[in-house]
Amino acid sequence: MLSRGKHRNPSKGACFMEFASYLAGERWSDHPSCTHPLLAGLARLVNDHTSDAARPRLAELIPSVIGLTGDDPRLDARIALCAARAALPVVAHERQLAMAVSILSGEHVLAELEGRRAGYLDERSRQALDQVPDAARWAYTFGRGVRISPKGFRRYAAPNTVQLAVRGIAQACVSDPDPLLRDLLADAIDECWALLRPVSGTGARPDAGPDAGTAAEPATVTAARPAPAAVDPARWADACRLTGLSA
C-alpha cells in the first residue's frame, strides 16, 4: 500500500514517487529523474496529505508520471496554475488571496512564454476567480505594476503555490478533501501530457497500466519531447499486488 514517508523496501510500503522510480527501473527514490521536479513535488505532497484510506486510489496514476519531464518552463506554470485553481474556491481566506495572485502571475508568465496578449486568462482561471470575487479584486489590485519573470516564477512562485495549495486543500472546511487532491494531481498530469506528448504518438494517456499508448502532441510542441517511459509489466503487476490495485 502507498504510505507516507520514505521506505527502502517496496514490500514495506512506499510513497507515490518511490513507486514511480520502481516502475521506471530507476534507483529506489522519491525524487526520480523520470518525472518533472515540480510534478513530482506535487505528487509527494498529495500523497502525504491524502488519508490512509484514500491513498491507494492514487496508485493508478503512477504510470502516468513516468517520462513526464523536460525543460519547458511552461510546465512549471501550468502545474502551478492547476494547483491554484483547485485550491482557490475551498481554502481559507488568507490562502485565497495567495492563490488568486498565483493564478494571475501564472497566466502572465504563460502569456509571455506563449506570445499571448497581456491580460489574457484561460477560461478555467476565469471561472476559478469568479468564484471568489473579493480575492480576485484584491489580487488584481495587488498585481498592478508587479510582474514576475518566467525564471522567478519557476524558481520561487511555482513551488510555493503548489505547497500552499495542497496544504490548504487538506485543511479546508470540506467534507472530504481526498477527491480534490486526487483530481488536482490528475489535472496536473494531463497538463504535462498536453505539452510533452510526441507528435508521432497515438492513443491515450497511460494512466492505468503498462499497455496504454501515447496521444498526439499539440502542434505548438516540438517533436523532440521524450515519450513516456514504458512500464515493465512484471513491475506493474508487482506494484498492483503491493497496492491492492487490479493489474
Image (cartoon, rainbow, N blue to C red):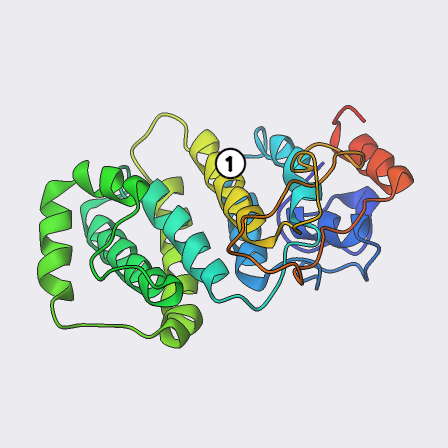
Name the residue at 37% across, 58% down.
Answer: 161
Count of numbered badges drawn on the protein: 1
Q: Which of 106 and 222 is in front in this view?
A: 222
130, above or below 246, in the image? below
Name the element at disc 1.
Answer: helix
176 displayed left or right of 69: left
229 displayed left or right of 60: right
Q: Which of 5 and 62 is in front in this view?
A: 62
Q: In which quarter of the image is residue 8?
A: bottom right
Q: Which amino acid does label 1 sit on?
A: Arg
Name the residue at 91% across, 39% down.
Answer: 234
74 displayed left or right of 36: left
Name the residue at 10% across, 55% down.
Answer: 138
Q: Quadrant of the C terminus?
A: top right
- Can you give x and y, in whole percent of width and height, for residue 132 in the image? 16, 40
Name the residue at 55% across, 45% down.
Answer: 189
163, above or below 245, in the image? below
Q: In which quarter of the image is the N terminus?
A: top right
161, above or below 232, in the image? below
- Can you give x and y, in whole percent of width and height, for residue 89 in the image? 26, 38
Crowd class of label 1 (few under 14; some 14 to 19; many from 20; radius 10 Å): many
- Can you give x and y, in whole percent of width and height, for residue 46 in the image? 52, 45
- Can you give x and y, in whole percent of width and height, for residue 22 in the image? 80, 51
82 displayed left or right of 29: left
Q: Which of 154 and 44 is in front in this view?
A: 154
Name the residue beneath numbered marker 1. Answer: 182
Residue farthest to the right, as pictured = 234
